Image: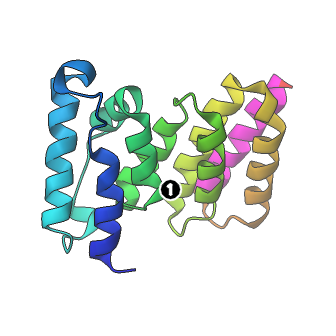
Amino acid sequence: MTESASAVEFASAFTPMESESSSTIGATIYDWAQAFQRAVVCMPSVPRSLVRISEAKLTQLASERPHSLLALIEKNALGAADLTFAAEIAGTIDDWTRVVPLLTRLLLHASPVVREGAVYGLVRHADRVPAVRATIRSAIAGLLGVEGSPGVRAAADDALVLLDDQL
């Protein structure tokens, strides 16, 4: 798939639903999502690392349009720095049936900072959704067995201690 095609696919997640308007989801995030969609569709050759999203905007997106944040993560539409924040913030989204498998896949990402963000996001879900705590613990323990990055290993160690305290 070309970069242009993937840009069009994930940009569709920013298209407002028929029931949405700037008054129902907030003018700021609505306008921002529309501008971002236009920028990505019109300039698909711009490297992902040049399309930056602030941590505050990612947090707002998770709160007001969680499906859009998850689409950005699923389509790998962010650079590693933004993707790590997006993964951590995804831990605040209530739809654990979609978030936990997505973040578990990010534990295999090429970038260590993204894997670290996925660990933090998963731990937030383990704290909020006891039913998936054992699955999350198993995924993080599996990462620890093969992880080469000291930062990710430290995050995984801390996560396992926290998860074991919760059991």
Please identify the residue farthest to the top as the structure is shown.
23
> In front here: 15 or 18?
18
**Quarter that holds the N terminus:** bottom left
Image quarter in which the C terminus is found: top right
Residue drawn where x is 82% and y is 48% of the image: 138
Q: Which residue is depicted at the point 58% across and 57% down?
A: 106
The image shows residue 139, relative to residue 26, as above or below, that is below
Q: Does 165 appear above or below 70?
A: above
Estimate the x, y position of residue 54 in percent, counting from the top left: 26, 41
Q: Amino acid at mark 1?
A: Val
Name the quadrant containing residue 135. top right
On the rendered structure, is 25 left or right of 158?
left
Q: Which residue is mark 1?
A: 114
**Above or below 80: residue 61:** above
Assess whether residue 163 is covered by the magenta stretch: yes
Q: Secondary structure at mark 1?
A: helix
| Residue at image point 16% right, 28% down | 28
Residue 103 image position (x, y, % from top left): 60, 49
**Number of numbered callouts drawn:** 1
* Residue 163 at x, y percent in the picture: 77, 32
Residue bounds of the magenta highlight: 152-166
Residue at x 63%, y 64% (from the top left corner): 108
**Residue 67 part of the magenta-drawn span:** no
